[in-house]
Amino acid sequence: MTVCTSSSLLSTIAPKDFGRVAVLYGGKSAEREVSLKSGAAVLEALQGAGVDAFGLDVGDDLLARLQSEKIDRAFIILHGRGGEDGSMQGLLECLDIPYTGSGILASALAMDKLRTKQVWQSLGLPTPLHAVLASESDCISAGAELGFPLIVKPAHEGSSIGMAKVTSVEELIGAWKAASTYDSQVLVEQWIQGPEFTIATLRGQVLPPIALGTTHSFYDYDAKYVANDTQYRIPCGLDATREQELIDLTARACDAIGIEGWARADVMQDEQGRFWLLEVNTAPGMTDHSLVPMAARAAGIDFQQLVLAILADSVEARG
């Protein structure tokens, strides 16, 4: 993959040729509020471009709605479980409705931080050492094995929900208990001290990497969606050789789990300059604070063009 710095990814499909498009957003995950904002922005962009699109806030009546509405394709902008984990993709395939983004397997795999890390490790791709927490004794063992500081993560959540940095066993136990309220499976990872980068992929190409800076202890929910002092650097500040290394690593990481359409990978760089893969998001945020639209703008692609490009991939990949 190479960095896309032009508008070569723009859709050439006429808006009317997309047919009737259901924008699936909201849902019941912990990321519902972010998804509502993302969905509203996507829907406005599609309608503004002349696409016959309507919004569908995903609830208990979803199946009936999908069967009763005339739907030619779906734009999935659900974040988290129920939309980004393969279940929505499987339902749409059963109903023969083409959709945006990755397929069932890649969506399910990327949503599971533990399984994603295991795939990367099997291929020799760098990802922080980790442990699975299920008890206080696990916390004690993980602290002794991995050392401090550490970061605790629910295995199946996004938007940094339930995450916490810890510097002692006592803090680790408390963070594990808090994360367990979101997910039955909780991970703890070695803390990587250094800059964080996020890299978006779109239709087989990489958008310009973004370097993130925050006054918080890490890039948490507030830094992502609320704070106005979060720093975003494009260009990312790496020299050409290191930036290409980051791009190549991201491409290998996404290929390893079968990413299609669009996604966003998060990568840390340690004090020795080594890169460490954290995770891949298969339906990233599309709010006014979101990173994929920011990277697209740096490549000369505005928000409406980005949304149409994502939708166009659903035609080319799934008919």
Image (tube, helix red, strand yellow):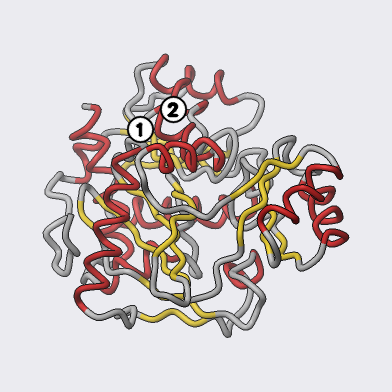
Decide: marks 2, 1 in contact (CB < 8 A)? yes
Mark closest to the chain's N terminus, 2 or 1: 2
Q: Mark 2 belongs to which amino acid?
A: Gln
Mark 2–mark 1 Cα distance, whole angstroms, equals 7 Å
Which quarter of the picture shows residue 148? Answer: bottom right
| Horizontal side, residue 123 vs residue 137: left or right | left
Asked if 5 appears above or below 60 in the picture, the reply is below
Which quarter of the picture shows residue 164? Answer: bottom right
Identify the disc placed on residue 99: 1
Asked if 278 appears above or below 122 in the picture, the reply is below
Q: Secondary structure at mark 2?
A: helix
Residue 72: image location, x then y, percent: 32, 28
Q: Which residue is mark 2?
A: 89
Which residue: 62% across, 83% down? Answer: 215
Q: Mark 1 belongs to which amino acid?
A: Tyr
Please, which residue is most extreme toward the top here? 94
| Closer to us: 201 or 65 | 201
| Closer to us: 47 or 138 | 138
Quadrant (top left/top right/bottom left/bottom right) for the C terminus: top left
Which residue: 26% across, 52% down? Answer: 202
